[in-house]
Image (spheres, coloured by chain):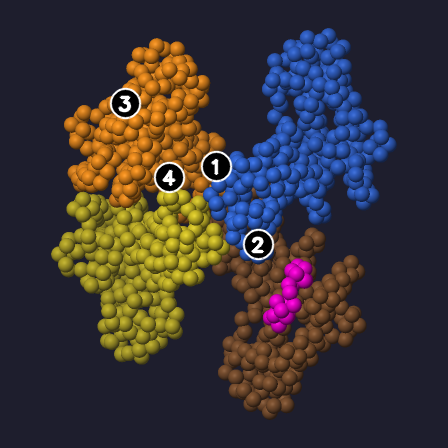
Chain colours: A blue, B brown, C yellow, D orange
Amino acid sequence: MTTVSLQSLNTADKAQFVAALGDIYEHAPWVAEAVAGQRPFATLSALQEAMIAAVRAASTEKRMALITGHPDLAGKAARAGTLTSESKAEQASAGLDRLSEAEFSQFHLLNNDYRKKFGMPFIVCVRRHGKDSILRQFERRLRNDAAAETDAALTEIFRIAALRLDQRVEAAERLKVHGRLSTHVLDTHGGHPAAGVTVELFEISRSGERRMVTSGTTNRDGRTDAPLIAGQPIPIGTYELCFHVGQYFARRGTPQADPPFLDVVPVQFVVAEPEGHYHVPLLVTPWSYSTYRGS
Amino acid sequence: MTTVSLQSLNTADKAQFVAALGDIYEHAPWVAEAVAGQRPFATLSALQEAMIAAVRAASTEKRMALITGHPDLAGKAARAGTLTSESKAEQASAGLDRLSEAEFSQFHLLNNDYRKKFGMPFIVCVRRHGKDSILRQFERRLRNDAAAETDAALTEIFRIAALRLDQRVEAAERLKVHGRLSTHVLDTHGGHPAAGVTVELFEISRSGERRMVTSGTTNRDGRTDAPLIAGQPIPIGTYELCFHVGQYFARRGTPQADPPFLDVVPVQFVVAEPEGHYHVPLLVTPWSYSTYRGS
Amino acid sequence: MTTVSLQSLNTADKAQFVAALGDIYEHAPWVAEAVAGQRPFATLSALQEAMIAAVRAASTEKRMALITGHPDLAGKAARAGTLTSESKAEQASAGLDRLSEAEFSQFHLLNNDYRKKFGMPFIVCVRRHGKDSILRQFERRLRNDAAAETDAALTEIFRIAALRLDQRVEAAERLKVHGRLSTHVLDTHGGHPAAGVTVELFEISRSGERRMVTSGTTNRDGRTDAPLIAGQPIPIGTYELCFHVGQYFARRGTPQADPPFLDVVPVQFVVAEPEGHYHVPLLVTPWSYSTYRGS
Amino acid sequence: MTTVSLQSLNTADKAQFVAALGDIYEHAPWVAEAVAGQRPFATLSALQEAMIAAVRAASTEKRMALITGHPDLAGKAARAGTLTSESKAEQASAGLDRLSEAEFSQFHLLNNDYRKKFGMPFIVCVRRHGKDSILRQFERRLRNDAAAETDAALTEIFRIAALRLDQRVEAAERLKVHGRLSTHVLDTHGGHPAAGVTVELFEISRSGERRMVTSGTTNRDGRTDAPLIAGQPIPIGTYELCFHVGQYFARRGTPQADPPFLDVVPVQFVVAEPEGHYHVPLLVTPWSYSTYRGS
C-alpha cells in the first residue's frame, strides 16, 4: 500500500487530498472532502477527529448510506471477489477468507438475522477480533435495539477508519490503535534470565483448533528480540504461549527428573483489549513456575 | 477378580495355595510351588520376596523359560485373543488393545528387532507406562547387551508379579506399588481454598493426542474428594491438568476482564516415577498463578 | 490446674458441681448454680450455652454486678496481687504483667477514661489479644455508647468463660476456642520438601519490639513436628516467621552467591481471628520465594 | 569535588595533568606522572588501564611504598583527622567514622594483627562494603599468605583508584564501577502495577541494627521514579526492602482482613556484587506475595 505523509496531505490540493483519503471511509469520499478545508492538521489524531466530526455532522440519510455501504462479513461480496481491497485485507486478517462450509453457513444465517432486524449489514472492525470473538459480537449485538446498534456500527466504522489512517499516513505521533504482547523468562533455579528458551504463540479457537501465530527464542535478557505481537491490534481471543523449558534446563545441565517434570509449559490467556499491552512472563525452575499479567 | 486373604493362603493346603497364586508369574506355577513350604508369610512383602528369591534360585533354563513364556506386547497373541486374562488386562491398561494400524506396525517391527537381537520377547510392566513411554523403553533397551537385558526383563517380571499379588491378596500392609496424583486450588485473590473449580486430567501423547483420564470438582478445602489417581501405578507419561478458573471467579463475582484474562489454566507435567506421590497445586488470582510439584 | 470430666460433673451433687465451676464466671458462682438443675449436659457446648443463657436471663443488677466484679486490666489489683488465679494467668498471657512504666501509665489512663464514661471496668478476653491489640480495642470501644459497650463486655465475658471451661472440663468434643498456626517449606529448586530448615516465630509490637514465641526445625516433610501455635487462641497481633534458608541450601551444597542472596527470609503477617487456622508456607529457591495464607 | 573532562586532561600540560590526578593513587603522584606521556587517552578505561600498568611496572619498593602509604581503616589517622580527603569520605561511606567503642577496638585489634603478619596496612575499597563485610574481609584475608595478600591489596587499590577516577573525570563512557538496585510492585489482585506503595530500604547489620538507606513511593508503573541505589557500588551487605502493602490495598478499597493479613512486607536479601544490577520485584495480593532476583 502507498503511504503518504501528513505534511504532504496538508499542502496537497483538494483533489489530491481526497484521492489519498477517499477510501478511509468505505465508499464515502465525501468524508475526506468535508474536512479538506480544515487543513493543516497538526497531528494525525486531529485529522481523525475531524473526519469523525464530519460523519456525526452529516445528515441521517448520508450516515445510514455510509453504514449500508459496508459489505457483509464473509458474505456474497467476499465470495464473489467484489470487496474493496481494504475490506478484503481486513476480512482476511481475521481468517474470514478461509472459513469451513459450516462456519460460512453460520455467518450467512447471522448476517440474514441481523439484516432482517436492523436493515443494515453487521459492521465490526475485524482486525481487532479473532473468529470466535466476531461470532460473540454478532450474538451480543443482535440483542441491541436499533438506536444502540446504529451507535455500535458507527463506533466500529471509526475504528476501521483509524486503522486505515494509521496504515496510510506517516506522522510523528501515531494513533493509539496498536497493542503489544511480550514475554520474559526468568530462571529462578539459577537466579538469572533464561536465554535460549523456545517460545511459541498459538491462537486457540473455541473448538480447540490451534494456529501458530509466531515463535521465537529468548535472548540473554530472557526476552524475545521483538515483542511477539506489535504494530497492530491484538485480535480479541484466546492464546497459548508454550515455553520449552525442559530442553532449556537439559542444555544447561540442571538436574531434572528423567524425563523432566516440566517439559513444555503452556500458558493460556485471553486478550480482551486489542490496544492493550500484555506482558506475560514466566518464572520457572525444573519443578515450579509462576506467570502473571505484568506491565 | 477373586481375592484371597494372606491368612487363608498361609493355612491353605499346598494345592490350594498353588491354585491361588500359580498365575502370579506368567505360565510359571512352579514359583508358587517353590515357596509353599516357607509358609506362613508374616507380610505380603515377605511372600513377594520369597517368590523373587525362588526365581533367582532357579536354574538358568527355568528362568529363561519364564521369560520366553511371556507374550509379545501388542503382538499376535493379543490379536488372536490367546493372552492370559492378566496379560490381556495389563496390555489394555496402557491402551495397547486400541492401537492404530501404524502403531501396531511399529510395535511389530520393534518386537521383531528385539527377538532377533535377544531371542526373547520384550517384557515391560505395562501398568507403569503410557504408550509413548513403552516405545521409549523399547528403543532404550534395544541398545542393551544380552546380560543387562536379561536383568531388565526379570526386573519387569518382578514388577508385574508385585502388581498381580497386590490385586490378588488381601493383607494389612500393602506393597508399595501405587502412586498418587492429587491437586489443591487456592484462591489467593480471596485468601481461601477455591471450592467448586472443575478440574480435568488429560494424558497427552507425543503426537499431541489428548485422552481424558478423569475429572472432578474441588470441595470447600480446595481439593478433589479423592485423589485424581490412586490405588495403581501412575503410567509414565505427560499429563495436563486443566483448571476452569474463569468460571470459578465469575460465579463468585470477582472482578475480571471481559472476557476473563484466565479462563482455563492448563498445567502440563511429566510423571517419571509411577509409584511417586505427585501433588500439583494451583495458587490463582484472575491475573496470575503459580504451580509446583508439592508434597 | 485440676481438670474434671463432663461425665463426673453430670453426676456430681450440686455443691460439687458449683465448687468445680463456680469461678468460670469471675466472682459469680450463681451462674453455675443456675444451671446445675439442667444436668446432664450432652456436650461441653451445651453446658456453655446454658451458662450464657443463665447470664442473659438474670436481672440487670446481677448482670451489671458480674461485669463490675471484673478487675482492671493491668490495674491496681494486678499490682497488689489480689487477682483471682484465672485472671492473673490470663493477664500474664498477654504480657500485661511485664509492662514498662510508660505502658502501665497508658493502661491506667485508659482504665480511668473508660470507667468515667461507662462506670465499669474494661473487660476483654486477653488470651485472644497481644498488647497492641488490647490497646486498639480500648480505643475503639471507648467510642461506643453504653448499650453497645455492655453487649461488648458480655461477649468478652462469654469468651473468657469458654476458655476457662475448655481448660477445666474434659469432654469428647472440644469447644471451638483454639486457633492453629503452621508452616511448610518447599524447596522448589530441588523439587521436594525442605528438611532441616530452622524456623523462628516472633511477635512484633507496634513499637518494633520483637519477642520470640517459638522456634523449630522442619522435618523430612518440610513441616515442623507440631504446629507453631495450637491448643489456644492465637493472640491478635503481628507475627514474623524467619526461615533460615541460606544455611539450608549451603548444607545441601546448592550453588548460591557468596554470601547467599537469601539468608534469612522474614515473613510478616497479622492474625485477625484468634480461632482461625493460619497456614503460612514458603516456596523457596536460593533466588526467589513465595508465601501465602494457605489452608 | 572539582571534576575535569577527559578531553582537557588530554590537552593539559604535564604539571596540570599530575595536579588533577596525583591523588588518584594515595600519596603516589608518580603514577599520574608515569602515564602523562601516553596521552591522549581515548577512553577513561584506557587511562585507568595505563595507570594500573604503571603500578605493575614499578619497582617492588615503589609498589610496597604505595601500599604502606595507605592509612589504617578506622585507625589513629582517622581519629586524629589526618586522612586525605578522599580516604576520609571513603571511610565515612562505610560508616567507619561512627563506630562504637567496641567496634573501634575490634578494628584496632584486627589492624594490629594484620600489620604484625603482613607489615602493611589492611587495604580494602570501602565503598564496596558495609561494616560487617569489611570485618569478614579482614578475617578472610588474615588467613592469606604474604604473596596472595600483596595481590589482594593491589586489587583493592585499583578498585579505589577506579572509583576516584570515575568521580573526578568526565567522559562519554563511564567505568563499570556502579551497581543498581531497583524494585517493581505488581498488584496481582487487580492485575496492574501497584501505584503509591511506600517502599523503604534498610541496611541490616549482623547485630540486627537497621539503618534506613532510602525510601520512595511507586509510580503508576509500579516502580520508584529513580532506582533505589544507582551511580555508586552497592555496599556488600544485607538489605531489607519494606513494602507498605496494607495501606496500599486499604486506600484502593480492596477487601482485606481487619487488621489486614499483610501490612508491611519485608524482603531481606544480600548483595554480593557491588557492581551488579539487583532488581527485586514484589508480586502481591492481600493474602500472598512472591519476590525474586529479577533482571
Amino acid marked by disc 2 = Pro
Marks 4 and 1 sit apart, C-alpha to C-alpha, by 14 Å
Marks 3 and 4 sit apart, C-alpha to C-alpha, by 32 Å
Dot 1 surroundings within 10 Å: few (below 14), some, or many (20 or more)?
some
Q: Main secondary structure of the magenta part?
A: helix
Q: Which mark is residue D142?
A: none
Point 71% across, 35% down: residue: A145
**Tag 2 residue:** A260
Marks 2 and 3 sit apart, C-alpha to C-alpha, by 59 Å
Amino acid marked by disc 4 = Val
**Tag 4 residue:** D271
Q: Which residues are magenta?
A: B136-156
Q: Chain of mark 2?
A: A
Point 19% across, 39% down: residue: D116
Secondary structure beneath label 3: loop
Quadrant the C terminus of chain C occupies: bottom left
Quadrant the N terminus of chain C occupies: bottom left
Towards the viewer: C151 or B159: B159
Marks 3 and 1 sit apart, C-alpha to C-alpha, by 40 Å
Dot 4 surroundings within 10 Å: few (below 14), some, or many (20 or more)?
many
Amino acid marked by disc 1 = Ser
Q: Nearer the viewer, mark 2 or mark 3?
A: 3
Secondary structure beneath label 1: loop
Dot 3 surroundings within 10 Å: few (below 14), some, or many (20 or more)?
some
Is D61 positioned to the left or the right of B274 in the image? left
Point 82% across, 35% down: residue: A75
Q: Which mark is residue D28?
A: 3
